[in-house]
Image (cartoon, helix red, strand yellow):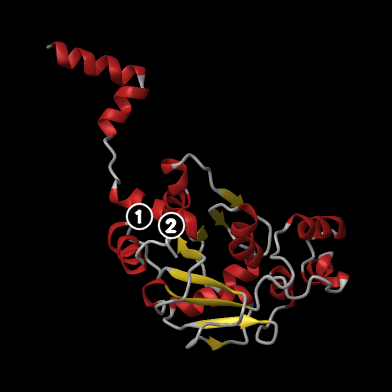
Amino acid sequence: MSDTPDLKYLNRLLLEKMRVKRRPVAITYCPEGPPPGYEPVQIVACGIVREAEQGRKVYVSREHHDCWVGQYHLGWNQQADAYITEGRYLTDAQGFYTPEAAACNKRQSHSLPEGFISALAAAPLDEVPEGVPVDLLICVVDPQRAMQIAGAASVREGTFPVGELGASACSSIFAAPWRTGNSVFAIGDGGGRMHNRLDVTEMFVSIPRHHMRYVVELIENFRIDPQKMREVIMPSFAAKAREARQE
């Protein structure tokens, strides 16, 4: 794809310049089936991020998955029973959810259109086979790096990212970027965090393909002059700077 940056270069920038601790992951929406060389996995949909971090090329599909909620949010079961679509599973499994809040959660959550993809594939960003398109870059990072990576488009074209809290991780990191056409930073739900082994300092960022070049540009142009920043926004510091120049 013409708007896709060099993936190995982007991966190197993230690891060596941005110092991302966990391996960046490439996600592919697959309308016609999984790419050659990707293996099916019987896991929760969001868990493919963790699998790709470990060096595997994997996919989930209608036939290969282990989560009814993920299947629903990926557009494979939009006629799902109300037990899923109205969030009744949330109240059954978690005592703090009211039925009203659970139903509202599902109404506000993003899902891919029915039949839009037949599989969702994941691979390490620097090991995507030639010819396989990459639709999303996903990283698990600390809040500071989430601010920088998810906010890359905001400092290059002025588009603020979307923040997600409360929805299922599969909705936030796979469907929300497509639905909004925007970069997303997400805390993730309890299951999504558990299956991807996020610690208390980490969150997800999910960057659509047309924003990936902004991540490259951000890192290539990354420069902060703290003294200049204080001088231009802090009156007390500006006054001291003027006095110093006059001496």
Q: Nearer the viewer, residue 241 or 225?
A: 225
Q: Would you name the residue on which mark 2 appears?
A: 212
Q: Of the residues shown, which amino acid type is indicated by label 2?
A: Met
Q: Of the residues shown, which amino acid type is indicated by label 1?
A: Val
Name the residue rendered at 58%, 68% in the picture.
Answer: 193
Q: Would you name the residue on which mark 1 appears?
A: 216
The percent position of residue 138, horizontal first and vertical second, equals 49, 65
Q: Is residue 179 above or below residue 198?
A: above
Q: Which structural element holds mark 2? A: helix
Left or right, residue 105 beside residue 224: right
Q: Nearer the viewer, residue 139 or 133?
A: 133
Name the residue rendered at 86%, 74% in the picture.
Answer: 81
Name the residue rendered at 45%, 41% in the picture.
Answer: 157
Furthest toward the front, the residue is 2
Whether tag 1 and tag 2 are in contact, CB under 8 A, the answer is yes
Question: Quick one: label 2, few (<14), some, or many (20+) residues within 10 Å?
Answer: many
**Quadrant where the image shows the N terminus:** bottom left
Alpha carbons under labels 1 and 2: distance apart: 7 Å
Q: Is residue 32 above or below residue 142?
A: below
Q: Which structural element holds mark 1? A: helix
**Quadrant where the image shows the C terminus:** top left
